Image (cartoon, grey):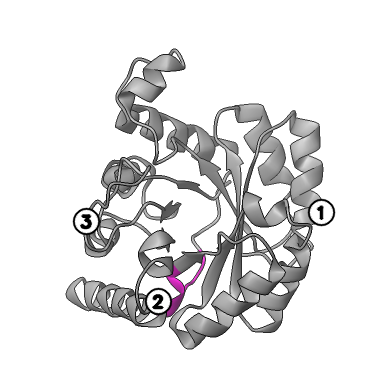
């Protein structure tokens, strides 16, 4: 059975994508952003450095929440073992691919901590032509909602999905299911590899529990100021919805 979304403070609803090549750069970014960011996503690039769990531990020691975004996909027994071991670390979110019900059931059963397991639905860099090349000739929103419902039935705690699909996911799954939206573009599309993007206020208005932001902060002239502006927009969004 899916568990309720994590109780997040407003400042924890912004997750910064710590896409860096190693520990030194990761710590530099945490210092640079200071109290403007309380939640960090660490992914595959950092894993390849060999510093992954050192960075995870360093974030936890600074009282930062950690999102392990490694998109696990394997046979159910292997995924169960991975989630069982990962749940012993101070992790708030982790990701698996949401394509295989038995694998998702194994992940849900193996999670023995407060960590929330999120299923990746359709990557935000993909559109309908990309799905068609994979033999799925359907609109992304239809595939995303179908996979979200499958994840919920399997006991997974929530999904990773574009903000464009947050509203239909929320309508289909109800309030007790986590929705985390990457590909957020505060100032609108910027011509990068993300196709299905939305702004901050739109994502939360449509039911997101948290958003993931990388390049709009990382490439800003003043990254800390950019993060603070997003935090302000999040706070204002929730004031409007009270």
Q: Quadrant of the C terminus?
A: bottom left
The residue furthest left is 240
Q: What residue does disc 1 label?
A: 85
Binning the other alpha carbons within 10 Å of mark 2 as few (below 14), some (14 to 19) or many (20 upward) gives some
Whether 76 is drawn above or below 18: the answer is above
Q: What residue does disc 2 label?
A: 223
How far separated are the C-alphas under marks 1 and 2? 34 Å
Is residue 133 found left or right of 205 in the rendered image?
A: right
Q: What residue does disc 3 label?
A: 188
Which residue is at 64% across, 77% downward? 27
How far separated are the C-alphas under marks 1 and 3? 39 Å
Are the residues at dot 1 and dot 2 in contact (C-beta closer than 8 Å)?
Answer: no
Are the residues at dot 1 and dot 3 in contact (C-beta closer than 8 Å)?
Answer: no
Of tags 2 and 3, the one toward the viewer is: 2
- Residue segment shown in magenta: 6-14
Is residue 166 found left or right of 150 in the rendered image?
A: left
How far separated are the C-alphas under marks 2 and 3? 17 Å
Residue 97, located in which quarter of the rendered image?
Answer: top right
């Amino acid at each position: 059975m899916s568990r309720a979304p994590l109780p997040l403070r407003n400042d924890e609803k912004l997750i910064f994508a710590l896409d860096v090549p190693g520990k030194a750069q990761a710590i530099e970014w945490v210092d640079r952003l200071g109290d403007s960011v309380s939640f960090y996503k660490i992914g595959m690039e950092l894993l390849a450095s060999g510093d992954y769990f050192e960075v995870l531990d360093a974030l936890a020691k600074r009282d930062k929440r950690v999102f392990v975004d490694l998109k696990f996909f394997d046979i159910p027994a292997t995924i169960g073992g991975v989630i069982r071991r990962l749940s012993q670390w101070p992790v708030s979110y982790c990701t698996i691919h949401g394509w295989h019900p038995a694998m998702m059931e194994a992940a849900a059963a193996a999670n023995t901590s407060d960590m929330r397991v999120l299923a990746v639905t359709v990557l935000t860099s993909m559109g309908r032509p990309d799905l068609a090349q994979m033999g799925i000739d359907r609109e992304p929103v239809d595939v995303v909602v179908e996979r979200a419902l499958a994840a919920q039935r399997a006991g997974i705690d929530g999904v990773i999905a574009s903000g464009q699909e947050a509203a239909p996911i929320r309508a289909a799954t109800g309030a007790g299911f986590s929705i985390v939206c990457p590909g957020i573009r505060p100032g609108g599309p910027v011509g990068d590899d993300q196709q299905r993007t939305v702004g901050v206020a739109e994502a939360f208005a449509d039911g997101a529990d948290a958003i993931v932001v990388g390049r709009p902060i990382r490439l800003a002239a003043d990254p800390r100021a950019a993060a603070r502006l997003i935090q302000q927009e999040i706070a204002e969004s929730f004031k409007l919805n009270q």
